[in-house]
Each structure stands twice: as C-alpha cells, then as structure tokens.
Amino acid sequence: MPGELHKLWKAPRPGAYHMEYGFFCMGYEIAGALGIKMAEPERDVICMVGDGAYMMANSEMATAAMMRVPFTVVLTDNRGFGCINRLQMSTGGAEFNNLLEHTIHGQPSRIDFAAHAAAMGAEAVKVSGIEELEAALARRERRRPLVGCGGARNLHPRRGQRGSQGLRDRPRIPDRRINPMPVRIGISPIAWQNDDLPDLTAAYTMEQALRESRAIGYTGVERGQRMPHDTPGLRRALEANDIALCGGWCSGNLLVNDLEDEKRAVAAQVEQFVALGAPCIVYAEFSNTVQGQSGTPVSRRPRLSRDEIHAYAARLGELARWMAGQGMQLAYHHHMGSIIENEDEVNWLMEASPREVHLLYDTGHLRFGGADELAVLDRWPDRVLHVHYKDVRPKIVDQIRASDCSFLDAVIAGAFTVPGDPEGCIDFATITRKLVAMNYAGWIVVEAEQDPAKAPPYECSRLGYETITAACRNAGLDIIR
C-alpha cells in the first residue's frame, strides 16, 4: 500500500499517530485497525476516519463485531470527501463532486452513522465536542468495536500548500501470528458473603473476601450486597485491594414495572457501574422468582409460554438499548427458580431479543436446569458477553429434584461447587476451547455458593482459579493478570 512505499509510517512511539493522506489508499483504515488489534490484542487501537472512508469499507465493522475484536473508530462527518476537496482547491483547482452537497440528482442524503455502526454490532455513540468524545472513550467497553460519530467543518488550506513524499528504505510491517483474544479471571464473593443466605456466611467479612480473592490471583470481583453501596466507598474498597469490578447482580422487575419505572429503578446501578468501569450489569427477572424462598420448591417456579417470553424479550430489548445508551451493557442471567431456567427458555429469550440483550453464560445453572451447556454455547456464541464457571454435584442435584426442595435448600446441601472439584461433572476444558474458537475476550467468573463449613471459601476459590488458569493455558487462551 502507499504507506509502505512512502515515508508515511510516522508512529514509532507513544503519542504519535499514522495518517494516510492525500490521493492515497482510502478505505483501508478500519480494516487496518482490525488487523493491528488481531496482531497485538494488548494494544489500544484507535482508528480515525471521515465519513467518506467509512462508507468505502464499513463492512469490516461487522467482521470485527462477529470476531469480537474490540477497537475504537472516531468518525468525523464532513459530508463527503473533505480531504480530497481541500486538496483540489489547494492545488489551484475548483472543488468538484466531492461533497454530498455537490449532488445534482436529488437531495443530499443524511446518514446516521452511529445507527449504521450499531446495526453491525458495534457500540456507537454520537458526540458533538472533545469533552463528549473523551467521556465516550472513558466509558467504552473493551470487547466490541466502538464508533464515535461527530461533525467536522470543511476548512480550506492556503492554495499551494501540500505535503511532501519520500520512499522508505524498508517496510515496517512485522510478521505477527494471530492469537486468541485474552480473558480476565474474576470471582463472585458469594462463597464468603451469600446475599440470599447471610447467616450461612456470617463468620466472614467482605473485606476478607476482597483481600483473599486478590491474593489467590483473581483480578476482578462482582458486586456483593455487603460491599459499600456508594460509588466513592466502593471505589476505595476495590482500589485498596487492587481488584476491578467485573459485574454485579441486578434484580429486575420488568414483568411488573413499566419501562420508565424500570429505568429509574436501575439507573443508580447503571451510573455506578459506568463510573467504575464494569463490563456489564447481570440482570435477571426477580419479580416472581422463587430462588430466594426457602419454603418453595424449584419445581414451583413461574413458567411462561414461548409467546410470553418473546413479549418479555421485546421489552427487555428496550431496556437494554436504553442501558447501552448510558454506556453499560445488559447480560441476562438465566437462573434456577426464575422464568428463564432451562435451555428452551434461554433460546426463546435470545431469539426474540435484539443484540443489545447479551447472555450471561452460567455453566452450573444450565446443567442444574437440565440444559446441555455445550449446545447453548454452540447456538449463541455471538451473544455471550459474560461467563460464570460453576460446577454441580450431580448426585446432590438428583436428590434435590427427587425430594422437591427449594433452591436455597440445594445451595446448603452442596448442589454447586467450583471447577476442579472431583465431585463435579462439567467439562470446562471443552468449554474453554469453545471460548477460544469464538474469540471470547471478556471475564470468566467463578461463582459457586456453598456452605463454608463444608467448603472453605479460600481453598475452594483457589481450586477454581487454578482449574480455570490451567484450562486457559491448555487451550492457548491468554489471561490478563
């Protein structure tokens, strides 16, 4: 390409940038950013394009979204090929057929580039100034492409003002092998602090949970109810233990609330999670669940028909779109005792909801609910945003089913356990290889609520961490530590 032949690679150090200028190869920018991010996934890649270049090769945005290769595109809309237009005028000519306003066949089009990028799977925001752009960059997620769109004026340089060119001695393209995207390993503090069964874990503190989680090697923790509720306090607790916020439960009431009421109900959590850089909110319908009722068997959970779940999915999509507009993603948690428990219900929810509704893939809840966890992952790889690695003890699950017990009874009895427990049954090695194949680049979170008298939190959480890291290593999946 021209950048290889001419001395145009001028970004050898931090703080510099590369620009293809003039009458050169236009339209390669997004594909170039995709290639850079694939070659060096640890780098923060930002691609700056005008609307003209974006219209030439925007299909690579869909490629990046499908491959889960996250980078940032900053698009300035100057209504056409503004750079070429300026060069025509700076060399003494008249502007000719470069701007949309130059059309003679009809009204110039008005393209919503943010909506176009979002339709291809990117996170998209409109900005109108540097401050808004900086805010959008600060809250961007690190898992799918971001497109920030803003207007730009067409400024004309003095006539005769041009750039100089020269030939390079040798190219600067390194030979890089494509590697899988890296993941992060987090944990839910539920082994130390069970929000549904507080008496079960009364001997443990949240401070201990954070400290020991980080000591084991976890770099993220999901929010627990005994953590500070205010954002400054939670930030201090996390920073004191050098650990990130990697998500957190949100009890949804969309079946009984109208959309505006539900937005107001979750707004504070959305704002807090955006401020703290969390990847998602773990959302599940809680209005009619039996998961927290000790006297109600799991078999008596609420059940909806396929049409009813489709209707719910449409409303959930509206909430997820609003949440995405605030800078936060919604990951729906299928859960024992709730309206979305088994494989059919997961499929119905996903097939009827927009892409803004992501899936929290929980291995333990799927297996407990009678689902084939591998089949679910095979069917919805492009919807999985967040992963919970949780094992089950099949003998205890069978006993719970046979005796018609509650979800809380199942927890106390030991239905759930961590990866690596010899009493477990889930094939995490195969699941991890599938995550590599789908280019998953999010968090893998250990979440296994147990009786700490039978399953000491530190020891079990360490076993889970060691099992996950070994599975990632064997699958060739890098971990950000």
Image (cartoon, rainbow, N blue to C red):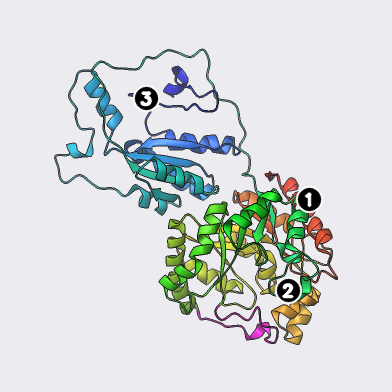
Q: Looking at numbered disc 3 in the image, what kind of residue is underneath it?
A: Tyr
- From the viewer's perspective, tell me whether residue 219 is left or right of residue 328: right
> Quadrant of the rendered structure where residue 361 is?
bottom right
- Above/below status of 182 relative to 407: above
Amino acid bearing label 1: Ala
Label 1 belongs to which residue?
Answer: 215
Please identify the quadrant where the C terminus is shown: top right
The crowding category of the residue bearing disc 2, from other C-alpha atoms within 10 Å (few below 14, some 14 to 19, many at least 20), is some
The image position of residue 107, as x and y in percent, is 17, 46
- Residue lying at 61% horizontally and 83% vertically, measured from the top left: 301
Q: Measured from the top left, where is residue 9 in percent x and y?
A: 48, 22
296 inside magenta stretch: yes
Label 2–label 1 contact, CB within 8 A:
no
The residue at the point 54 percent across, 69 percent down is: 347
Q: Which residue is mark 2?
A: 198
Quarter of image, res 83: top left
186 vs 155, left or right, is: right
Across and down, in percent, residue 320 comes to 47, 63
From the image, state whether disc 3 or disc 1 is nearer to you.
1
Horizontal relation, residue 359 to residue 470: left or right: left
Task: Say which amino acid is labelled 2.
Answer: Pro
Can you tell which quarter of the image residue 60 is in?
top left
Front tag of 2 and 3: 2
Q: Secondary structure at mark 1?
A: helix
Q: What residue is pinned by disc 3?
A: 21
Give 157 or 395, whichever is nearer the viewer. 157
Q: Is residue 125 visible?
A: yes
CB atoms of marks 3 and 1 within 8 Å = no
Task: Judge the density around disc 1: few (<14), some (14-19), many (≥20) Cα neighbours within 10 Å.
Answer: some
Q: Earlier in the sequence, mark 2 or mark 3?
A: 3
Give the residues in magenta.
Answer: 287-305
